[in-house]
Amino acid sequence: MEHSVSIRELSVAYGSVKVLESLNLDIGSGEFIVLLGPSGCGKSTLLNCIAGLLEVTTGQIFISGKNVTWEEPKDRGIGMVFQSYALYPQMTVERNLSFGLRVSGMDRAEIEKRVARASEILQIEPLLKRKPAELSGGQRQRVAIGRALVRDVDVFLFDEPLSNLDAKLRSDLRVEIKRLHQRLKNTMIYVTHDQIEAMTLADRIAIMKNGIIQQLDTPHVVYNHPVNLFVAGFIGSPTMNFLKGNIDGAGEPSFGLDNIKVPLGTYKFEKATGKVADGILGVRPEHIAVGDDAKKMPFTLESEIEIVEPMGSDTVAWTKIAGQSVTFRCSSEIPLAPGQKVLLGFDPSRASLFDAVSGLRV
């Protein structure tokens, strides 16, 4: 695959504080990459380095094969959409869209053509004569996206563009951004701390922690095959259940929880393993079956429900396994109540095993 953006050994430090450290990343042409992680993990710093808004300490950045490490932002062939709309309040939507092109001295006919195209794609033609104060938050963000779109560049950068919007608008604009990418097929790099945005938008997700990419893969792989405890705990809502115990990989492999043994015959180990003194079994709440469905699972046990949280289409409930708190999710049609005894079950082949010391997948 041809690389649209390549980052080589990129480091950013402020004095003794390292924000990014020897980071490498290749992004394919037309790919939608999401940089995901908690606040302070370095995702926005990386995006700003690509945009040319921050100087790098060491390393190189290539866009479309050209070394742009020390190029000005305007010369990098990128369009950027910020978290704040950053629109000029005194200008109409049309003039906001065309301002950068007019400053660059572009031909008026070409400017009108680009503004018309961006307006049509984003469905903001009726808003062109309005000023930002007359627009809703979602409309302003569309204009901000349009301002990047008129530049007609190969790479678009999004810095948490939906975080200022309410839940309904976020959902609607998420679909619009996905539709935009499918139509334009440009390379898009998108920063967020919202895992739903990451899972729904990305071709690949780069999950970051302390300036280091922990895992870079498709949403499916990141969700079902997390490489370490951090990734496993960060992806998924409700979060993955973590049960502390012992992994015995010798003979017939199993996971020990006090006097409970979970068979691991169907689990795919990363490599051959013997007895691991301290292990962690990760099971997603939605992978735990209840009642009759649980009877079909390789591992079952009876447990008492502590808390029930109706969520509309489904229900989230809390219980304990071997004295450790466990959450499970099931259909809202299954009646559940605190104090009720239920049969729970799961397939260990869908679970994740981690070394409790290193945090790495076993």
Image (spheres, rainbow, N blue to C red):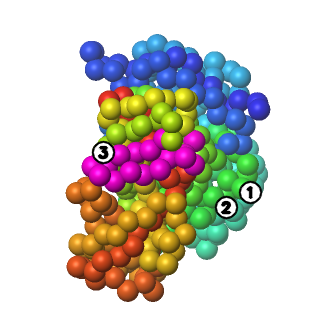
Q: Which residue is mark 1?
A: 183
Q: Say if 324 sits above or below 277 in the image.
A: below
Crowding at label 3, few (<14), some or many (≥20) Cα neighbours within 10 Å?
A: many
Q: Are marks 1 and 2 in contact (CB under 8 Å)?
A: yes
Secondary structure under badge 2? helix
Mark 1 vs mark 2, CA separation in Å: 6 Å
Which residue is pictured at 27% across the width and 74% down the height?
A: 305
| Secondary-structure class at tag 3 | strand
Identified by mark 3, the residue type is Lys
**What residue is at 39 percent from the left and 73 percent from the top?**
343
The residue tagged 2 is 179
Query: For the residue carrying disc 1, how many other residues have a C-alpha within 10 Å: few (<14), some (14-19), or many (20+)?
Result: few
Q: Nearer the viewer, mark 3 or mark 1?
A: 3
Q: Amino acid at mark 1?
A: Arg
Q: Which residues are magenta?
A: 253-268
Number of dots carrying numbers: 3
